[in-house]
Amino acid sequence: MENFEFLRNVTIGQYFQGDSIIHRLDPRAKITILLILVVVNSFILSFTGNVLLLSWCIALVLLSGISFRFMLSGIKPALPLIVIFALMQLFFYGDAYPPYGMESVTYWRWGIMSITNGSIQLVIVTLMRFLEIFFLVSLLTSTTTTTNIAYAIESMLEPFQRLRVPAQEISLIGTIALRFVPIFAEQMEIIMKAQASRGADFGEGGVFQFVKRTRQMVTLIVPLFVDAFRRAEDLILAMDARCYTGGRGRTKIVRFHMQRVDLLFIAFTAVFGVLIMVFRNHFPI
Amino acid sequence: MDTRGRVIIQVNDLHHTYLSGTPLEVKALKGVTMEVYEGEIVGIIGRTGAGKSTIVQHFNGLIRNRERGRVVVDGHDMADPSLDVRTIRQKVGLVFQHPEQQLFERLVGDDIAFGPKKMGLPPEVRRERVRWAMEMVGLDFEKFKDRFTFSLSGGEMRKVAIAGVLALQPKVLILDESTTGIDPRGRKELLSRMLNLNREHGVTLVFVSSNMDEVASIADRIYVIDDGRTVMHGTAREIFAQPEVLRRYGLGVPHVTTVAHRLAQDGIPMPRVPLTVAEAEEDIWKILSS
């Protein structure tokens, strides 16, 4: 059965109005917390560490009051890819990673393929790490408006401006990219419906019939690219018409000030992160 | 006019909710009832967000009704899960707003032939269909079939896109705001071509528009949709005779009709509600000469 409700599956980049403590945090605080947790995420290879980190991320999601089920539904489109990567790791990485905190055991071997407890651990840990990042990024974009994210990035890059880092331009590029995700999702839905109306069949062929599905995609990708270029040109024109000349000397109508609660959140995350990092080689499994 | 044939599309108390079960849930339809007879031109009007597009997307199975209500198209209950929607989409062609955005083939002819090709028709039949569809929208087959799609002007691209739907030879053609964004002359031409399609080739038209002058000039009957419900229906003349009610739904009346209402207020009643400039001219001429 076809389902054209594309926005149902795009959870990253979609902002949800709310008044939770997460919504009210200073956007710079949120990005700092995100950065800390992403760094921690990339160092933790043990089960225990990832369970801790994942529960921390889930706790943040619950605090934000955003529907957990809805957020999870955002993974659906990526599922086939995740499954393929997981299978490749399971079969081909058996010898590459010795398991953390366990004696290496090989369960099965055939030619270059093998399954060891190391590869099983790798699959599970990778999945958890993916979920952590996914939750964190979704949480940032669903509780922070794009303008606030842009402001935060700009403000955080300001110190680097002396090193000729174009802070304002970078944040602008980021904002435009984020802003266009739901627009393209919507446009894709319209084009998909239009093509289906003249006989294209989407969703036919199983999830894993890539060639067939890719060929169907041509009828979407060409119009989508044309549309993207048209929108980019319109945007340039609109910016020119409003005399946009880049960031130098621009002032803000809304200014953010870090509150106690922001600093508290950052401090708490930092302590949590440092503790996990310090003890990362001392977890039993 | 009572030349009504049989009912080809029947909608009964239709409800629809977008993104149901998510935080973005929107109740778009809350009880729409309407029918479309074979061979007529039905207009659907209503302010933006009233649910017009949602309704017509039910007509060719882009949205299947799973909530309350019933949609029957050419004798098929659209809620039936065993129904092959592709057969419905060949009978009911839907043209969206800015249809030129759906073009993807390099050559005009290939793009129009996409639908017939998907239907599995042999090449000679496909060619005939493309020729017919191009003729219907006013594109010369020999001149345009090998032109590059993306080198055409906006108006020509729109014609190609409409031809792409017509090539399916649908019984019903739905135009969902398909005339917005082109120049007045192009609009007028397109309207008269669509009218010809209806009168000469018996294609039933469903015309969704926010341009009252257009709807008045083409539609036999009109449905007014507001907040997801059918609030008025009748012949074009009946509907546009009630400007106050229409205003309540955020809608206006055609310019010529406004003139007639103003004349009536000044004590010069017109014999009928004029729907086109030609009608108004005829009536005013009659009044002046009597």
Image: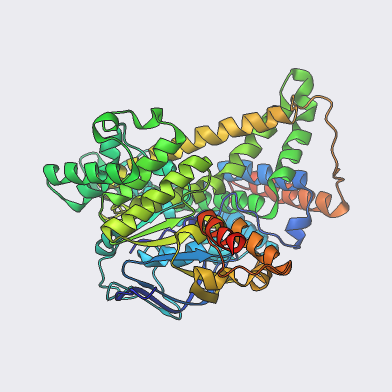
Residue A204 falls left or right of residue B10: left
Question: In which quarter of the view is residue A58 placed?
Answer: bottom right
- Where does the image place residue A234, in percent across and percent down from the top left? 60, 33
Q: Nearer the viewer, residue B115 or A236?
A: B115
- Where does the image place residue B63, in percent across and percent down from the top left? 41, 65
Q: Is residue B283 above or below residue B80?
A: above
- Where does the image place residue B219, in percent across and percent down from the top left? 45, 63
Q: Is residue A229 above or below residue B56?
A: above
Q: Residue at x 26, y 44 (%)?
A: B114
Q: How many marks?
A: 0
Colour setting: rainbow
Q: Nearer the viewer, residue A260 or B246?
A: B246
Q: Nearer the viewer, residue A198 or B24?
A: A198
Question: In which quarter of the view is residue A168 placed?
Answer: top right
Residue B266 falls left or right of residue B41: right
Residue B13 visible in the displayed image: yes
Q: Look at the image and tell me in which quarter the N terminus of chain A lies.
A: bottom left
Q: Is residue A178 above or below residue B244?
A: above
Q: Residue at x 40, y 30 (%)?
A: B152
Residue A104 falls left or right of residue A152: left
Q: Is residue A148 above or below residue B19?
A: above
Q: Nearer the viewer, residue A21 or B191?
A: B191
- Where does the image place residue A53, in percent across and percent down from the top left? 61, 54
Residue B33 falls left or right of residue A134: left
Residue A82 visible in the displayed image: no
